[in-house]
């Protein structure tokens, strides 16, 4: 066993020393994969095709025709998102695909670097680690799915993490979260991070930025805004089948395990209460030890669990979670290592696409097969294990003195720092 650990450390040291080459090799393999098997970014096609309708009307009537089990892909984001995507309609399709791919890969680098930056002192902060995680993250299923579909997840993740890790002013940090939430509702859970770290002014700026962006969209497209915020915002049927294994939220997992009416059952509320309790314990533990990345990972994973529909490509936050498990203050704990291995297995082996292919050959009958339902809960299980790893552990506490770049994130808001 000691020999195995020694070889692992040697390999790790070699990878760190050659991090730049590892990233270059990963990018080259990605370019080769894209060249041999060009993706069909259907979501990007929706963004580009629907965005002009925000000005002319019919934004939420536009849809791209696909196939079962989601034969139509409508535009499901707030009107402000259509305004953001509007420049895409002016570019040739080939140029849009290339620009989106390059920007998304660059966003992955930002996510890795900023996640490393938010780690507590003494927990492996460094550029080499960020490059290595970006190289590895390029092959995780949520990231691959995001790139293949032309989804906006990596770009919004970079805006949120970059906004929280780099700016020195409360206005900049809050605006990053607020504007991301105005494009797509799921990043709004970043406000929980601001509240948990007692960044009151940043949280207020987040609300103001989201409100201002929504107001601008309402002035430009009042009809589409009224339609979206009055009815469509809560209509999960437009997004897709909640029961499908594509949906890795808690509701999706329980719908496959317990039945489609799980949302109103006692079992649902019991599981929600237990998961919420574990998230609260994780949030409290991370906040007490001034673990910024731990707080953010808890907030984002909890948001993905509680959202009615969290497609597997929404789970790009598994990468910051894995970074925390590998380098955070509880990195030596057995539970952290087991959880890291679980994330690596289910995302690296592309478990969800395998289950999707099996699901697509099923007859649409009830109940959902247990052989698919249990492994189809993998992301939810990994998220809860991450909460437990955050809430427990050997009790290590990082040094109380933080570097200037991290302390500056909170000085303006009178956070917990002494």
Image (spheres, rainbow, N blue to C red):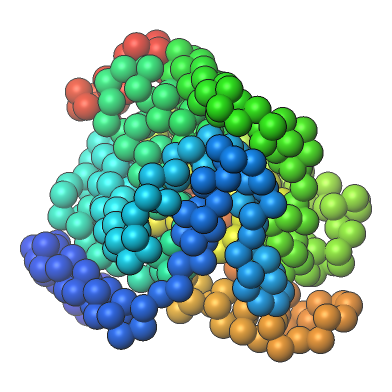
Q: Is residue 185 visible?
A: no
- For the point 83% across and 81% down, the residue is 364
Vertical relation: 287 (above or below) 244: above
The location of residue 408, given as percent across then percent down, is 27, 20
Q: Is residue 288 above or below residue 274?
A: above
Decide: is 169 above or below 292: above
Image vertical order of residue 366 relative to residue 167, above or below: below
Which quadrant holds residue 131?
Answer: bottom left
Extreme front residue here?
A: 56
- Residue at (40%, 12%) from the top-left corner? 413
From the top left corner, tell me how far across and down residue 336 is, in percent.
44, 57
Inspect this view and state whether residue 132 appears. yes
Residue 285 position in % (x across, y down): 51, 35
Residue closer to the observer: 109 or 347:
109
Left or right of residue 103, residue 318 in this image:
right
Between 147 and 397, the one lying in front of the other is 147
């Amino acid at each position: 066993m000691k020999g195995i650990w020694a070889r692992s450390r040697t390999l790790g040291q070699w990878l760190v020393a050659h991090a730049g080459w590892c990233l270059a090799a990963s990018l080259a393999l990605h370019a080769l994969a894209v060249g041999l098997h060009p993706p069909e970014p259907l979501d990007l096609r929706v963004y580009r095709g629907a965005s002009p309708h925000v000005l002319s009307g019919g934004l939420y009537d536009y849809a791209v025709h696909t196939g079962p089990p989601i034969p139509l892909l409508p535009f499901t984001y707030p009107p402000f998102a259509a305004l953001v995507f509007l420049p895409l309609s002016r570019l040739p399709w080939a140029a849009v695909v290339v620009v989106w791919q390059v920007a998304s890969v660059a966003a992955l680098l930002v996510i890795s670097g900023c996640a490393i930056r938010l780690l507590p002192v003494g927990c492996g902060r460094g550029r080499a680690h960020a490059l290595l995680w970006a190289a590895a993250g390029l092959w995780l299923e949520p990231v691959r799915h995001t790139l293949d579909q032309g989804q906006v997840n990596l770009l919004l993740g970079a805006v949120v993490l970059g906004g929280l890790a780099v700016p020195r002013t409360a206005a900049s940090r809050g605006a990053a979260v607020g504007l991301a939430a105005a494009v797509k509702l799921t990043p709004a859970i970043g406000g929980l991070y601001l509240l948990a770290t007692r960044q009151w002014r940043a949280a207020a700026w987040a609300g103001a930025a989201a409100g201002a962006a929504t107001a601008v969209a309402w002035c430009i497209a009042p009809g589409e805004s009224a339609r979206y915020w009055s009815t469509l915002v809560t209509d999960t049927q437009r997004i897709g089948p909640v029961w499908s294994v594509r949906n890795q939220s808690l509701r999706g997992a329980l719908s496959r395990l317990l039945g489609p009416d799980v949302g109103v059952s006692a079992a649902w509320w019991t599981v929600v209460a237990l998961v919420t309790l574990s998230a609260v314990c994780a949030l409290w533990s991370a906040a007490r030890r001034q673990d910024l990345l731990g707080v953010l990972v808890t907030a984002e994973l909890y948001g993905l669990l509680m959202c009615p529909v969290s497609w597997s490509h929404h789970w790009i936050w598994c990468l910051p979670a894995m970074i925390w498990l590998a380098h955070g203050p509880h990195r030596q704990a057995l539970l952290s290592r087991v959880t890291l291995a679980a994330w690596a297995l289910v995302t690296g082996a592309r478990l969800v696409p395998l289950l999707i292919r099996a699901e697509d050959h099923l007859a649409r009958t009830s109940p959902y097969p247990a052989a698919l339902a249990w492994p189809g809960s993998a992301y939810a299980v990994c998220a809860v294990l991450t909460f437990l790893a955050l809430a427990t552990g050997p009790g290590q506490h990082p040094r109380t003195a933080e570097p200037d770049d991290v302390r500056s994130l909170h000085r303006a808001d009178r956070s917990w720092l002494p």
